[in-house]
Image (spheres, rainbow, N blue to C red):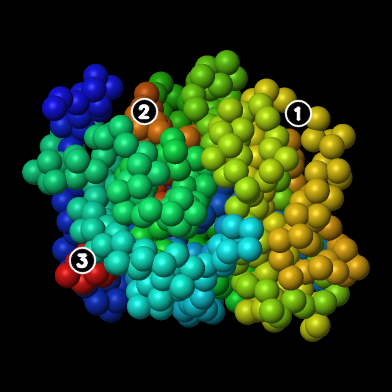
Amino acid sequence: MGFPAPTLTIIYEMLVNGLGAPHPQPPSLAKLASDSMLSRKQFGILNKRIIIIGAGPGGLTAGLLLANRGYEVTILEKDKVAGGRNAPIQDGPYCHDTGPTFLHQKFTLDEIFAETGRKPEDYMDFVKLDPMTRLSWGDLSLETSSNREKMAANIEKSFPGEAENFLRFMDDHASKLKTIFPFLLKPYTRLSSYLDKNLLKALPYVATTKSVMDVLSDYFQDDRLKLAFTFQAKYLGMSPWNCPALFSILSYIEYEHGIYHVQGGLSKISEGMAKVVTEEGGEIRYEAEVEEILYRGENAAKVRLTNGEELTCDQLIVNADYAHARTTIFGKKKQTNEDLRKKKYSCSTFMLYLGLDTLYEDQPHHHVIFADDYHQNLADIQGEKIISEDMSFYIRNSSVTDPTVAPKGHSQLYVLVPTINTRHGHDWQGTQEEYAEKIIDKMIASTGMKDLRDHIVTRKIITPTGWENAHIFLGATFNLAHTLSQMLHFRPQNRLKGFNNLYLVGGGTHPGSGLPTIYESARITTNLIDEVYDQKRTPVDFASGILTKAAN
């Protein structure tokens, strides 16, 4: 049986571009620190100036790595605090995370800190959650866990006869992730970099027209249980019926390796990274908004700030929403809105941040409530025109785990509703209060928080239009869609095509959105800059051992 024509094109491109090789075993932290100091002295690169636009997760990761490697690093951040969408929102006495609410694939963050001779635990307090998330379909719920035996038992209780299917899924995906993971960590900028013998091993998982839902249908009978392994596609802003089969690994990563809360909120990761940047001699300038990139030939030579100040650079990294940046700060090389609108984008989100004068101790830390017709709900969102009345939503009630984010006896709730981006317009200004009330009605009906309205002290809303006003193109909070035509070589590249010294980090470049992948985008980019100056170093690799152990 042959491949369909689109798949043949993808296969051809991937054969040209190749996959990455596994990393060697990690060195000790002491050796890393020693090697770092040696490289600084040996290569004398302290006079090479790197400017990074944006102190989001990608910019901070790139900043701390490059500063540690001996470069002169300046991060320009338009806001008063670091983090971007991983920054805190302080609403009176209640502290909310703007975006990400938990960390998965923690070994990637461990690797990033280890490259500087540090551990993230020295900067933040992690809590591994168990149970992880409550998933609810009407009166039926499932408590998820990263303990296989416990998860299998929970599945069998809610979905009799499906426990063995779960164990089969986990075994198969342990091998799948081990095979796929290395090629996701390679850059896709030069053809010579992509020829790799491991390509054929990963090709069946990548060059396929199957969706995540198709993959899950090979394992599970109950459609509701399939959703327990597909809702993670929303991290990419996509429907599991449209999301490439590759991303079935997302649920496996959670159920195998767990998820973590950070006391004080996930914004503490950004705070910790910012501290490492400055400890390594890097500079973060706040309220320093870039107006325009200035060029000399194909090189980014300077950036001009909105106050008129101009800063020179040897290498420039852009950590911003890709499409927004390309249509604004790229100066004479910027693209038009019309050009960027031709690409495919993720959904948006309607956000509620609530401060309460009570604590619902019987409610879970994380709770996902599925729409009665989840398929139609996501079809509405993907169609980008219809706002679903039958909505799915996510609640984080982190105060049951973390006493630091609200006053004693109080709590804060983070509520996220996936919805349409702004491509076709909608009057959110005129409808946001009504929509917020509908969400609260759904929360009261679907959870144990029956007296919720009596306890709301503060309420903050961010609509898709609000995200767009915050420099996110079309309000697409998960950036460019992760379709096969917008992945790997087909996604905006880490060294941006057409430029000699201009790089991207963040969800709009390879390997994609989500905190761990954004960290990886920064590591890929910093390694590309090292290549320019013939820097050689032993990569930190905890992942290979962890993934091999899981696969065995």
Residue at 77% x, 78% y is 359
Contact check, label 2 and label 3, Cβ < 8 Å: no
Q: Position of residue 301 (x, y in %)?
A: 47, 32
Which of marks 2 and 1 precedes in the sequence? Answer: 1
Write down the residue under mark 1: 426
Numbered disc 2: secondary structure:
helix
Q: Which mark is residue 485?
A: 2
* Mark 1 nearby-residue class (10 Å; few <14, some 14–19, many ≥20): some
Q: Is residue 552 left or right of residue 51?
A: left
Which image quarter: residue 399? bottom right
As drawn, is 347 to the left or to the right of 108? Answer: right
Residue 422 appears in the figure: no
Q: Residue at x 58, y 37 (%)?
A: 376
Rendering coords of residue 255 (x, y %): 39, 66
x%, y% of residue 107?
Answer: 36, 68
- Mark 2 / mark 3, whichever is N-terminal: 2
Q: Determine the residue positioned at 44% across, 24% down.
A: 296
Q: Which mark is residue 224?
A: none
Q: Residues within 10 Å of mark 3 (few under 14, many from 20)?
A: some
Residue at 49%, 34% (x, y): give it. Answer: 480
Residue at far front of view: 160
Which residue in the structure is indicated by mark 3?
A: 551
Spatial distance from mark 2 to mark 3, Cα to Cα? 29 Å
Q: In the rendered structure, which amino acid carries the disc numbered 1?
A: His
